[in-house]
């Protein structure tokens, strides 16, 4: 069992980090904490369109990104690092429920 990230996983983590560095600075976090929504819907939309984070663990044949637990952990670590102010549902549904959930 390998305990290191693959090059693809490292690049994915770097992409998430770059995105969050641009979109979730400490000043942004403070500003958004004072708003009614508490997050920026435009950034949420960009996360979906540019990185596919909202469907990270869904299989590609169902419109997801097809990533697994390791990539989910990488995203959550980077969100914590950036103090990202929006919760993200990255849970993996059991295989028997995936098709039903999507279609």
Image: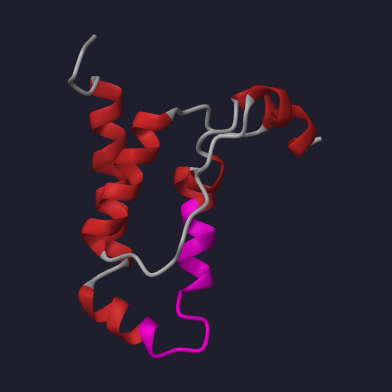
Q: Nearer the viewer, residue 5 or 100?
A: 100
Q: Quadrant of the N terminus?
A: top left
**Residue at image location 50% in from the left, 62% down from the top:** 44
Magenta highlight on residue 33: yes
| Left or right relative to 83: residue 92 | right
**Residue at image location 48% in from the left, 55% down from the top:** 88
Magenta residues, as a range?
Answer: 32-47
Residue 4 in picture, x, y percent from top left: 18, 21
Q: Nearer the viewer, residue 33 or 27?
A: 33
Residue 100 in picture, x, y percent from top left: 79, 32
**Residue at image location 29% in from the left, 28% down from the top:** 9
Magenta highlight on residue 81: no
Residue 13 in picture, x, y percent from top left: 27, 39
Tell me if residue 76 comes above or below residue 102 in the rendering: below
Tell me if residue 25 comes above or below residue 91 in the rendering: below
Tell me if residue 96 comes above or below residue 58 in the rendering: above
The colour scheme used to paint the residues is secondary structure
| Left or right relative to 64: residue 12 | left
Q: Quadrant of the C terminus?
A: top right
């Amino acid at each position: 069992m390998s305990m290191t990230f693959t090059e693809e996983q490292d690049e994915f983590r770097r992409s998430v980090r770059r995105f969050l560095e641009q979109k979730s600075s400490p000043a942004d976090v403070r500003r958004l904490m004072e708003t009614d929504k508490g997050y920026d819907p435009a950034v949420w939309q960009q996360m979906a369109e540019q990185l596919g984070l909202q469907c990270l663990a869904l299989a590609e044949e169902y419109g997801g990104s097809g990533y697994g637990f390791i990539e989910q952990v990488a995203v959550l670590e980077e969100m914590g690092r950036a103090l990202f102010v929006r919760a993200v549902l990255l849970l993996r549904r059991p295989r028997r429920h995936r098709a039903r959930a999507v279609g």
